[in-house]
């Protein structure tokens, strides 16, 4: 896939997509450039709006939260107000603007299913005059493979994690990293009452225990000359679900997979640099799994990253 970037920028983004906390020294080595050049290139990528955020993917279930994917179709008159609401709502993480059956997709978090339903009802009541239709379905598992854009192989091996319950200081660290995965120990010491070494040790433990899944980037793919589509596929043969997930995970252009509790469908994202190629790619997937059927296809532009919703850390000072 051809990107609107030169070789050095691609090397930097490839390295940071796999580990956005990577120090400048290691990034310089990965990009085969000086620290000064890498620092300049990163700032330029930020200024161009290609790098939108530095993301820490956190297992919110371990922090006591469940989530639901919500998709809505809207009337046009208050769409901008709705977009601003989604981007500022503390209960919402990941927001995608879509062009297809739905206009927006989002994830809503809560401590219980009832709390998720309450937050959805709150949103629905505020915009009920413009919501034409909606779908709410509880998250089961989400897999993200955005690094495939840079020809990086992904691993789907299940990791074994140590059982551990995060304390208040751990949660403070997670809160700061959720805001900026690149925040260094000098800044973290100012916000968490621990030494730099103690914070470093706690971060390592949070990684080993599965609280921190990975450090990545939130990019504006449209500025790289890439189109991202969201596709829903029904599972008529549920026995094939694992095979389908494995197939999509290994597909070079599939960038995410979302599985939902109790539903026969799953959602996946796919990158293309030419929209006219999409039909052929879908046909290949359908032919590989003839018992399944594509039911929805939407062009998607992500507005809010996969980092946790602010509600997860609301009570942490």
Image (spheres, grey):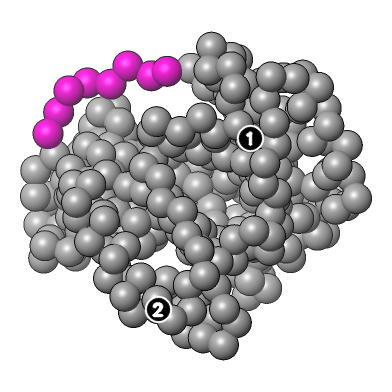
Q: Is residue 304 visible?
A: yes
Magenta residue check for 164:
yes
For the point 51% across and 86% down, the residue is: 78
The spot of residue 37 in percent (x, y) is: 67, 61
Q: Classify residue 127 by image quadrant.
A: bottom left
Q: Name the residue beneath numbered marker 2.
A: 127
Q: Which mark is residue 233?
A: 1
For the point 59% across and 22% down, the residue is: 236
Magenta portion: prevailing SS class: loop
Q: Are marks 2 and 1 in contact (CB under 8 Å)?
A: no
Q: Which mark is residue 16?
A: none
Q: Which residue reaches farthest bottom?
A: 77
Mark with earlier residue (2, 1): 2
Quick one: quadrant of the N terminus?
Answer: top right
The spot of residue 121 in percent (x, y) is: 29, 66
The spot of residue 23 in percent (x, y) is: 48, 48
For the point 45% across and 33% down, the residue is: 263
Give the CA separation, mark 2 to mark 1: 29 Å
Secondary element at image label 1: strand
Magenta-drawn segment:
158-165
Q: Indicate whether 24 appears above or below 232.
A: below
Q: Indicate whether 294 appears above or below 23.
A: above
Nearest the eye: 54 or 140: 140
Nearest the eye: 79 or 191: 79
Magenta residue check for 266:
no
């Amino acid at each position: 896939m051809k990107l609107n970037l030169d070789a050095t920028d691609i090397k930097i983004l490839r390295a940071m997509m796999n580990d956005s906390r990577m120090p400048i020294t290691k990034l310089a080595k990965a990009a085969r450039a000086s620290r000064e050049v890498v620092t300049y290139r990163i700032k330029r990528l930020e200024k161009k709006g290609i790098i939108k955020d530095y993301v820490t993917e956190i297992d919110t279930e371990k922090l006591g939260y469940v989530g639901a994917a919500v998709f809505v179709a809207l009337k046009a008159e208050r769409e901008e107000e709705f977009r601003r609401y989604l981007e500022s709502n503390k209960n919402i993480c990941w927001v995608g603007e879509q062009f297809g059956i739905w206009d927006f997709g989002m994830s809503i978090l809560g401590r219980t299913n009832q709390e998720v339903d309450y937050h959805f009802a709150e949103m629905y009541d505020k915009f009920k005059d413009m919501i034409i239709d909606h779908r709410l379905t509880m998250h089961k598992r989400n897999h993200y493979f955005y690094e495939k854009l840079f020809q990086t192989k992904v691993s789907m091996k299940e990791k074994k994690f140590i059982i551990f319950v995060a304390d208040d200081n751990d949660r403070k660290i997670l809160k700061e990293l959720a805001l900026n995965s690149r925040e260094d120990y000098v800044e973290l010491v100012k916000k968490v009452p621990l030494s730099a070494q103690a914070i470093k040790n706690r971060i390592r433990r949070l990684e080993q225990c599965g609280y921190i899944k990975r450090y990545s980037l939130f990019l504006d793919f449209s500025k790289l000359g890439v189109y991202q589509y969201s596709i829903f596929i029904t599972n008529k043969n549920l026995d094939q679900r694992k095979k389908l997930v494995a197939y999509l995970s290994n597909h070079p252009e599939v960038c995410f997979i979302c599985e939902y509790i109790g539903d026969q469908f799953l959602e996946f994202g796919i990158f293309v640099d030419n929209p006219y190629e999409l039909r052929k790619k879908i046909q290949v997937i359908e032919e590989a799994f003839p018992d399944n059927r594509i039911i929805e296809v939407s062009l998607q532009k992500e507005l809010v990253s996969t980092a946790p919703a602010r509600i997860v850390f609301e009570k942490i000072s």
